[in-house]
Image (cartoon, grey):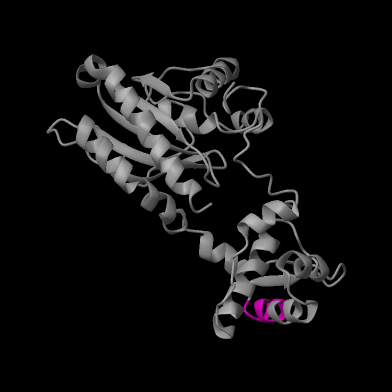
Amino acid sequence: MTPYDRDVPISWRKDTNNPLTSMDMNDLLVKMEGEPAAVKSIFYAANVLTCLSHGVYNITEIARICQINKATVHRILKAMVDSNLAIQDPIKRQYYLGHSISRIVANPYTTHEHLITCGFQAMSHLSDVTGETVFINILLGIQYINLREIPARFDLRVAEVTRKTGHVPAGASSKVLLSQLTDDELKNAMQFMDLKYPTGQMVTEKTLQAEVFKTRRAGYCISYGERISGCICISAPVLNYVQPAAVSIIGPESRIRPKMPEFLHEVKEAAKQVSANIAKTF
């Protein structure tokens, strides 16, 4: 059994609609032993924001989890409200993330720079050994976003177009991203998707669902000409990240098919390396 089996919960994904346990929160909080007072205040604020972002909204609970007194938490939250990093519900007296946080994280290309950094070495190696276009992308809602691309070294190359977005379910990378959703999330997402591939082929929800489940079980996906005729895309999931993510290569079928086993192995190893790099910090 793997994390991609249909009925097995994906353990690396957190349910942000529910507060994490104290043990989980302790793993996320910044440790501040031995730091000077001026630096500790920044760490306190970071830990308070972590609590708010994981469903802990009242001062007493924040103070308990962060192991600081309620007066300090109140002062930090007041400063955050004044700077629009937090807001307070005047009825429940609870605190929530403010609109400044949304503005900070609105740009996916800067918000997910950490993922790009964790993937740089593995993507560079993948580019060296395959020579084909290498890219890393994420799923936000039902949109896939290409964060970074390394072009193929050949004169004839296939480009996914850096920073391209879309919600077409065609292609190996899209199926790998969708495979990281729960069954309910996938069902809801498919209601809003255009099930017509760029090459003109139409698929049904049942067919797409079956392909996504197959990708979950396999832990990778290979597509043939679904987005661009005559091209093959090989993709594998990047785990441990806050959003579904994937590392992929794409190129002409004439170059990729003869080396399919070797290239598939390299793509899977690259995805594992990126996942391991992320796990060190998340």
| Residue 26 in view, yes or no | yes
- Outermost residue on the right side: it is 91
**Closest to the observer, 280 or 50:** 280
**Which portion, as a residue range, is magenta?**
77-83
Return the x and y of residue 201 as percentages of the image width and height: 43, 17
Q: Is residue 32 above or below residue 155?
A: below
Q: Is 79 part of what is drawn in magenta?
A: yes
What secondary structure do most residues of the magenta stretch adopt? helix
Q: Quadrant of residue 183?
A: top right
Which residue occupies 32% across, 41% down?
122
Return the x and y of residue 212 as percentages of the image width and height: 54, 22
- Outermost residue on the front side: it is 34
Q: Quadrant of residue 123?
A: top left
| Residue 228 in view, yes or no | no
Which residue occupies 62% across, 34% down?
10
**Closest to the observer, 262 or 184:** 262
**Closest to the observer, 219 or 200:** 219
Which residue occupies 43% across, 23% down?
221
